[in-house]
Image (tube, grey):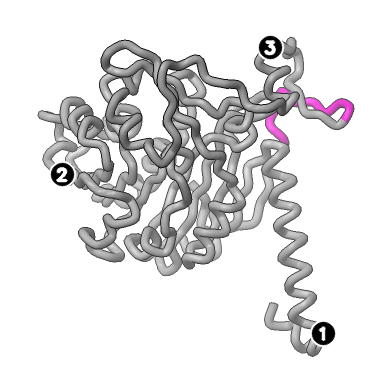
Amino acid sequence: MELLPELFGSGAGYVAGAILAALIVLVLAAFRQGRTIQFWPPKIGPKPPGRAVAGGKTRRRGHVAGPDDKQLASFLPAPVATATRMFEVRDAAQFYREIASNYDQRNSDRLLATHMEVITRIDHARKMKPALQVLDLGGGTGRNVATYFFNDSHISWTYVDYCPAMIEQLQEHLTGRRLYEHLSVHLDDINRIHLRLQPASYDVILLNLVLSSMPQPPDFGRIAALLAPGGRLIVADINPAYTQAHPYYQAPAADGTQIALRTRPVQPLEVAIHATEAGLGLSEMAEIGSGEISYSFIATFLNPGGPDDGPGAQAA
């Protein structure tokens, strides 16, 4: 980029803008094809095995289309949830309070696969730094991610959630375990927790299946300020196309009635823009799951100034 002014003079800004736009188009095209994207060293992986392109549509080889495929492919208006009560994301706190005791019952293979991708990336960071400082924003019951590290006496886990019932579930799962000795629990909002925590203190910050339950994205600048140099922000959430086809998260309340939350589609590019504007570098973005529309996505962002920032650094 430093050579552009010498080569193009006053037009260097337009050229740089055109290059950036082309890179964004390339990344989006690769992401939609299910390729893994690594930003340093620059690398776009091959298309996932088991997919074939025919007639401009991507399908799994040997897959027989069923009702779910037709629903996903048609992009018809969102179906109405068959629940006794409905919640919007502005009332998500009440919804999660009512389903807390049954929250983990809805763990499908696709959800578990998403959690495992998050765990894999935390594990990668733990191998480089055993005494890892993790900040889990909107951690839920902790059963799917935090409990994976329940016997680790080196990791320090800071948990934040605005739902007291979820905190009760977390404590039930971890009490008496080694991780519990290094567990700090905060009942607070993601957008206010920075007022209670030390800046530049966390090696890993998680936003795992959280953003789709928020009315709007959190302040990524405040989140980035909590990352230690070289720390990473890991964001995983539902593919927006999947959310548009299946907008309702339906679950049983404590009294056995079915209630539903209408979730918000989360655009991976929007997440990347917010994170990069906060000074973080996009290290990796990938789809999770196969099919015409993948179930979820995961992205890793690095805070400059650490061992992961520079030539030869590998994405998680």
Q: Residue at x 15, y 37 (%)?
A: 180
Q: Secondary structure at mark 1?
A: helix
- Is 73 located above or below residue 67 in the figure? below
Find the magenta span and give its range: 46-55
Whether tag 2 and tag 3 are in contact, CB under 8 A, the answer is: no
Q: Secondary structure at mark 2?
A: helix
Mark 1 Cα-neighbour bin, 10 Å: few <14, some 14–19, many ≥20 = few
- Which quadrant would residue 90 be assigned to in this image? top left
For mark 2, what is the residue?
182
- Is 168 located above or below residue 133 in the figure? above
For mark 3, what is the residue?
67
Q: Position of residue 77 (x, y in %)?
A: 68, 27
Q: Residue 53 magenta-drawn?
A: yes
- Which quadrant would residue 55 be assigned to in this image? top right
Where is the N terminus found, in terms of image quarters?
bottom right
Which-is-in-front pick, marks 2 and 3? 3
Which-is-in-front pick, marks 3 and 1? 3
Q: Earlier in the sequence, mark 1 or mark 2?
A: 1
- Kind of residue at disc 1: Phe
Q: Residue at x 50, y 59 (%)?
A: 275
- Kind of residue at disc 3: Pro
Q: Earlier in the sequence, mark 2 or mark 3?
A: 3
Q: Earlier in the sequence, mark 3 or mark 1?
A: 1
Q: Position of residue 51 (x, y in %)?
A: 74, 26
* Distance in Å between CA atoms under marks 1 and 2: 56 Å
Q: Which mark is residue 8?
A: 1
Q: Visible in this render: residue 215?
A: yes
Q: Visible in this render: residue 106?
A: no
Q: Residue at x 15, y 44 (%)?
A: 182
